[in-house]
Amino acid sequence: MSCLCINQLRSLAAQFKNLPMQMLMALAADALGPLNTGAAGAMSLSAAASASASASAAASASANANLSMNLSASALASIEALAYMNGTLGLGSFNASAAASLNVMATSMGQNLPSLMSALGAFLGPLTDALNKLLELASAMNNIQSLTGVNLGMPGVGASLGAYASASASASASASASASASLMAAMRLNAAASALGINLGAPGGAASLNAALSLAASINPPALPVPDLSKLLGQVSALSSANQALGLDMLKKMAAAALLNKLGIVGTNLSAAASASASASAAISASASASASANLSAVAAAAASLNASLLAGLPNLGPMSLAMNLSAQLHLLTGVNPFASSPCSSCRAF
């Protein structure tokens, strides 16, 4: 990652100046209807495709009915925020060096985020409604593709997606209950520990996580405006998600026409999926399940061995992880990764 020095600010500003604001503001009125329709249809289809995963989760819950987790929601959220930042930076196993890098980044965020938010808000604020719907559409499309392998933005795929929709009723019926709260907490904790380079279910896993928690207590996250930050993250995520789901670079001058064309394709596919025969044969893959290597009982036992005072002493890393997510989305969109994990060679910010 690099510093948000003047050169980086200039690079970001130059790219967002390419955003055809007047054209996109005009597009917002024309595209908001198709965006609403497309987002609603894609979200419904995404829920149908997710039904089989729910069935698998219900089976896992049944198999782990006696699992018990004694970990507060806030502690789990802090561990997940730490894991997200560590994984996003590619720091590997969380150690003293990783904690130092996060502190450097915290300083960079505190110094530079207000001006960055102000600059981006001026570009994106007028498009809030359209961007919110674009984010819903792109997120649903990405979920559909991850579950089915089918890109809703490709012409002619509606009929095949209709098969998934027709199978959703039976899949939903088989998913008699969602996974238990304890099971889900164990899965989340196990995933977070893995992102910190810790096998929590293995011997010594709890001690390793306790050591990581002790190091995390040294992180000094900046005070950040969470509501405004969350709003901006959603706006930038809409643009980066459109790139991934729709294959559109929304910072290019022809983005408006390309978006309208893609919305037409999506609408056609959704209509075809909705009209697909209810008797169509389909087999929704329910291969997604809890990690085969995870011993959730061992994870729950390790959680019980976590040091309560260390858990209580964790700083609130949630806002900082939001800012890092914003940085990651900006990198996907522009190639610029604003917040520093180490000083860059050409600036004097540190």
Image (tube, rainbow, N blue to C red):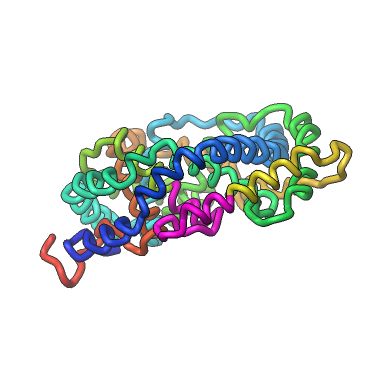
Quarter of the image for residue 150 reads bottom right
Image quadrant holding the N terminus, namely: bottom left
Asked whether the viewer can see residue 86, the reply is no
Image quadrant holding the C terminus, namely: bottom left
Q: Is residue 184 left or right of residue 155?
A: left
Quarter of the image for residue 11 reads bottom left
Q: Is residue 41 left or right of residue 170?
A: left
Q: Is residue 175 left or right of residue 293?
A: right
Asked whether the viewer can see residue 155, the reply is yes
Q: Main secondary structure of the magenta part?
A: helix
Q: Residue at x 66, y 56 (%)?
A: 154
Q: Residue at x 40, y 51 (%)?
A: 208
Query: What is the x, y in percent for residue 133?
Result: 49, 38
Q: Residue furthest bottom?
A: 345
Query: What is the x, y in percent for residue 25?
Result: 39, 43
Q: Residue at x 86, y 43 (%)?
A: 280
Residue situated in front as seen by the camera: 301 or 348:
348
Query: What is the x, y in percent for residue 291?
Result: 62, 50
Q: Residue at x 35, y 38 (%)?
A: 231
Residue situated in front as seen by the camera: 273 or 258:
258
**Which span is picked out in magenta?**
238-262
Within the magenta stretch, is there residue 10? no
Within the magenta stretch, is there residue 244? yes
